[in-house]
Amino acid sequence: MAFDYPQSPHHRRHAPAGYRNYQSYKPWLRDEFTFRCVYCLCRERWFPDGDAAFGTDHLQPQAAAPDLQTQYDNLVYACCQCNSIKGDSEVPNPCQHAFGKHVNILNDGTAQPCSSMGTELAEICRLNRPRLVAFRRGMIELLGLLGRRQSEQARKLLQTYLGYPPSLPNLSELRPPSNDNPEGVRRSYYAQRQRGELPETY
Ligand SMILES: [Zn+2]
């Protein structure tokens, strides 16, 4: 489950605009893409430094489309490794394409493309880099083992690995110059936690 790519294109819940600096969108993107890298699906909670291991990635690279540098629709959340590997390549847009229709993750940790777009995505982001494959395989084994155990300790560990990060961004405190979808703030994970509606895992 943790490595299943979405079966439908991502529908953005937020629409902040007007920041001069693209890094200012990071808290919005953390919430937007559920605290995980859109390319490799690794989650903040799997990194010792949490969101410090993630950044704001440009779908259309800054060099090719400087006018889109601070456009929210051109930004996604990605781990620093995927971000650095893809460099200035243009990647398929997860808001237009369901990655789950193009790439499957097998139980041995390998990424198996099932379309030409999947092959392109796997190549650009090097989704089969050996250390990532080994990490995935280990996580799949660990999560499978914990899922089969019916104990409080296993439940807590699953919550650690598959739960939301402890520090969720409070988007209602942010003041972007404009926001075309203020309703999204009410649906943010911070707001859900405040209302006691946040699931234990995702
Ligand atoms: Zn990644």
Image (cartoon, grey):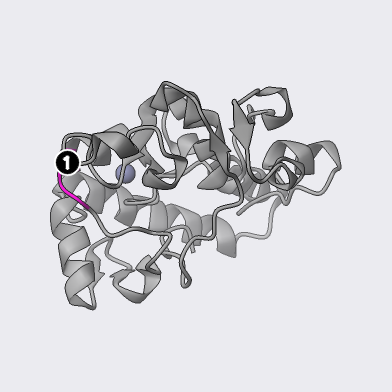
Is the CB of mark 1 within 8 Å of ligand 1?
Answer: no
Residue nearer the viewer, 130 or 73: 73
For residue 14, above or below residue 45: below
Q: Main secondary structure of the magenta part?
A: loop
For residue 130, above or below residue 77: below
Label 1 CA crowd tier, 10 Å (few <14, some 14–19, many 20+): few
Q: For this view, does 75 lie left or right of residue 62?
A: right
Residue at (51%, 29%) from the top-left corner?
18
Q: Indicate the position of residue 47 as horizontal and vertical percent values.
A: 41, 32
Residue at (29%, 73%) from the top-left corner?
102
Residue at (44%, 37%) from the top-left corner?
46
Residue nearer the viewer, 85 or 110: 85
Q: Indicate the position of residue 199 as horizontal and vertical percent values.
A: 73, 51
Q: Is residue 54 magenta?
A: no
Q: Indicate the position of residue 144 as horizontal and vertical percent values.
A: 48, 61
Residue 4 placement: quadrant:
bottom left
For residue 112, above or below residue 137: below
Residue 109 placement: quadrant:
bottom left
Viewport quadrant of the C terminus = bottom right
Q: Indicate the position of residue 127 as horizontal and vertical percent values.
A: 21, 54
The magenta-colored residue range is 85-90
Q: Residue furthest front?
A: 67
Q: For this view, does 13 lie left or right of residue 56?
A: right
The residue tagged 1 is 64
Q: Amino acid at mark 1?
A: Ala
Residue 11 placement: quadrant:
bottom right
Residue at (67%, 31%) from the top-left corner?
171
Residue nearer the viewer, 124 or 71: 71
> Ligand 1 is in which quadrant of the figure?
top left
Dot 1: element: loop
